[in-house]
Amino acid sequence: MPVKTAIVGVGQTDYRFKRTDVTIQELAVEASLKALEHAGMTMGDIDAIVLGIAPDALLGINAVDRWIGEALGVAPRPLLRVNTGGTTGAAAAQAGYAHVASGMARRVLVVAADKVSESPDAQWVLNTAMDPIYERSVALNAINMCSFQAVRQMDQYKVTERQLASVAVRSRKHAQLNPHAHLRAPITLDDVLSSRYVCWPLKLLDCCPRSSGACAVIMAAEPVVRANHSRAAWIRGMGATSNTIYMGDKMGPGRDVDHADWDELAMAAARAYKQAGITDPARQIDVAEIYAPFTCTEIAAVEALGFAKKGSGGLMSEQGMFDMNGAIPVNPSGGVLSANPISATALARIAEAALQVMGDAGPRQVPGAHQAVATGIGGTLQFHTCMVLASDA
Amino acid sequence: MGQDERVEAPLIHSGEWNIHYDYAVGETATRFFSRLRDEGKIAGKRCPECKAVLLPPRAYCERCFVKTEEWVDVGPEGTIEAFTIVYEPFDGLPQPPYAVAYVTLDGASTAMANFVRGLDLSVPEVAARELAVGKRVEAVFIDARKGTITDFHYRLK
Ligand SMILES: [Zn+2]
């Protein structure tokens, strides 16, 4: 039986375009110290560290784990660096969870940091993350790979640009409740619809920003939690999937899943829900933190998580089902559309979900939130994670 | 020691990565690109288990974990599965606007990405209607082929 595990501390820096006052290592330490303080611990209590850093080229520091590892202290404990692109922060949390659930560590620090703004060339970097043989030279990047999804949603489900825009408007509305968010100025449907096309059909305001910031969580084993912590976010379920880098495999007649959808997230969710005993997610989940860097991706995710029928996510969004006072509040933090420090982004979803069930989410708290779900996405929409967190074990 | 009251502008050190690599593309892609370069033909590989004709061709079927052996010519015509039109300039990437589509070439089980050329992209809404999912295209082979994916592109039928 796995050791029951909970998140007992959360630390986030503010997410901003630039942080010229700190290095990447200082940024990671800043979030780590906040998480330790929230957990009432010191670095000496930590048995293992998992560091989430996405492709080095975003920072321009090769093997940056050397530099950050040094800053996280000298101690006889393992430091493991994890990278699965956008999913990195959640994969790091998955590795931290495995450390505690296996009984190999009692207290684990999971930390992720990024300064995406230090190069103006993020999309060029993400282009180099494509298959170098067949796909890199046709100018694929992180934005147009999601445009392909939006085009298929519009074709198959008649998703409209206005429905996509409703996701952006809500995210920004929620971000006003989150002092950590990078983009907090309110926007209207017309603002989104009249913003310029970046990669058809995605417009500027359908897209996430490039952010700098760090996020950390402390995970602890049940005996530690019971002895020391009055509030905890118990990890009730965790699922993850991995699929092909070739998006075209999810489009042709031989496809087993469709690029319009996130069936892979549905598979990860099914596993997490089963572990958590969730049979009716729309009723049993109180709040969701979804890794959605583009408006269309959130629509795919709410369907995959079972909040909306396939093809109806856009309409549900437009009708307000995912607003703070809607049936299932989605991204009270403002989500990825309001801050995307790439390495830390998926961990921030978990951190925000944990804060919700701990009752520590401040102005963005969903009243009475007992059970939350957090997702991660990375690669060419190929890696998915889903974690269920609850206020009881 | 007194409090240091100076406010200094943040100091920025610049760096660049410009690193050369020579990627061996492997036997499967070597065959694919040689055929493309020398004969102007696009070929996928059929999985002996699930029978899918994989394009881009792969040495192994990723679903069945078996080696692929049989080459199958596909196209040159096909159907648009998804597309985008890029209007934003990105460093290191082509000058916009340009269109990229995933196309299922006739006979293939999967779609392959490439540029769509020969289309006026100046008005997004108009160009997007032209490039709709389901539209037929053909692969057009350039004369000066080098054995790379941009030896061909798509053009609306
Ligand atoms: Zn097969």
Image (cartoon, coloured by chain):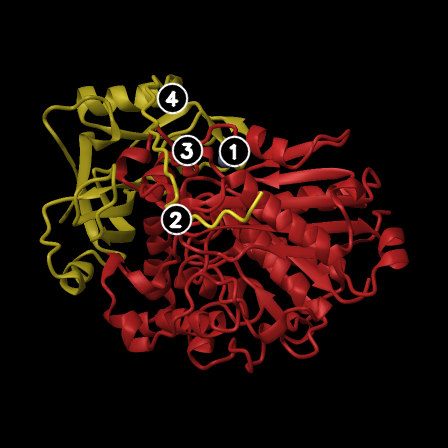
**Chain for numbered disc 2:** A
Residue for point 55% across, 42% down: A26
Is residue A229 left or right of B50 when viewed as pictured?
right
Residue A43 in view: yes
Check chain identity for marks 1 and 2: say if they share one.
Answer: no
**Are the residues flagged by discs 4 and 2 from a single subunit?**
no
Q: Name the residue that disc number 2 marks.
A: A253
Q: Amino acid at mark 3?
A: Gly
Residue nearer the viewer, A134 or A59 = A59
**Hue used for the chain lettered B:** yellow
The residue identified by callout 4 is B28
Task: Give the SS element for disc 1.
Answer: loop
Which class describes the residues within 10 Å of circle 3: few (<14), some (14-19), or many (20+)?
some
Q: Which chain is home to disc 3?
A: A
Residue designated by label 1:
B49
Instruction: In this rendered view, identify the residue nearer to me: B51 or A59.
Output: A59
The earlier-in-sequence mark between 4 and 1 is 4
Q: Position of residue A172 (x, y in %)?
A: 43, 70
